[in-house]
Image (cartoon, rainbow, N blue to C red):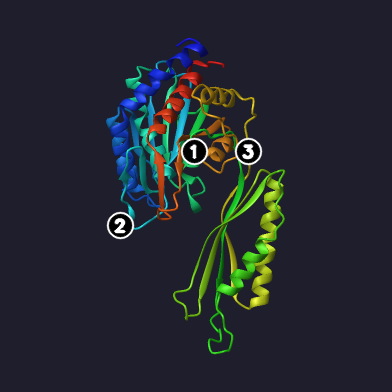
Amino acid sequence: MNSWDDLLAALPDLRAAALAIRDPLLSDVIALVETPAPTGHEEARADRLAARLTEAGADVGGVDEQRNVVAVLPGIEGARTLLVAAPLDALDIPDAQREVQLGRDELIGPFVGDNAIALAAMAALPTLLDRAQIRLRSNLLLIAAAGSLGRGNFAGLRHALASSRWTPALGWCLESVQLGRLNYAATGLVRGEIRCALPPDYDWAQYGASGTILPMADIIERMGRIPLSQRPLSTLVLGSIRGGISHSNIARETTLCFEARSESADELRRIRSAIEDIVEDAAARSGQQVSLDVAAWRDPGALDIGHPLVRRGRAILQALGISPMLYPTTSQLGALLDRGVPGITLGLTSGRRRSDLDEVDEAVSISALATGLTQLVAHLVAADLELTP
């Protein structure tokens, strides 16, 4: 391939190569879903993925001290290095819930749309490039990064980028869904937990003693009144609340998990300050132990929409008949941009949360995955040859 038109003409062949590896790819997805990898304890999944990449022909450096899996496909020339990264960790669930169902064109299971497909796709890249008879001039650096969720704050990817002897010229962060996303901006965020606990001298016998849930409800109501700007866009997500054990027992402790996001660092600091004020006031008014624990803080960053990575991404999606979805992301892209590596985030397939499924279960399209893989290979080839749409 010597031109952009040559690459577009080759898209059907790339898709055929992606379809040819469908069955082993789905087997890898199922195996990864069935392998626990809670943040901070990703060793089992890391070992499985390292073995898979070795089998596919990549040079695997093993599992590092942060539980990352780092592998390299040396390029013909090796003058530049292209990076593909995917999150290794997943939310923790009981083993009994790890069943994956394979339908005619759907894969249904716990968090299949959150990491497992992206990891399997990354592990399949050496095989897919070989089947498509593509040998990149550039080195291809593959990182399955631990510590990507919750309190992880991208610790794994940050460590891998800082310690690697390979300096990426460009990077792609893979997410399982949604196909068509083309994130070139990383949203800043503050992620934390608010904890309300009864003091040691709490009077359990007093009439009207209500425990920690009502004070937390007041905190939530006040957080809902924090002004959120629309430009720059800011949001506040209340992800989960847990506390209490039964109808009649007073809840001794209640915890709220939240995440504030903004395209502006100043807006993010304002929201955080407002939450800190609410927490301090709640502690003073309720007489209970109310504390704020900030688990992660990330500043926003972005490429210019005219960057070659973004231009190529839009052109590839349009050539595949997909409308590009351009919006800021909280994905691993932030770690790349912080390191000075130009990058974007891509989705690999379409997915949906059906009302008839359990909360942890997701349904993703199998046929769309071939299109997502075609997109990814087209990105790598275009960047490797520095083709311009």
* Position in image of residue 334 (x %, y %): 56, 40
Residue with the mark numbered 3: 301
Specify the quadrant that holds the N terminus.
top left
Given residues 183 and 62, the one toward you in this image is 183
Label 2 and label 1: CA atoms lie apart by: 27 Å
- Looking at the rendered structure, the kind of residue marked 1 is Gln
Label 2 and label 3: CA atoms lie apart by: 40 Å
Q: Earlier along the polypeptide chain: callout 3 or callout 1?
A: 1
- Looking at the rendered structure, the kind of residue marked 2 is Ala
- The residue sitting at 63% across, 42% down in the picture is 300
Residue 212 quadrant: bottom right
- Select label 2 or label 3 by which is in front: 2
Residue with the mark numbered 1: 178
- Looking at the rendered structure, the kind of residue marked 3 is Gly
- Select label 3 or label 1 by which is in front: 1
Neighbourhood count class around disc 2 (C-alpha, 10 Å): few under 14, some 14–19, many 20 upward:
few
Report helix, strand or loop for mark 2: helix
List the single residue furthest toward the top.
2
Label 3 and label 1: CA atoms lie apart by: 21 Å
Q: Can residue 47 be seen by looking at this rendering?
A: no
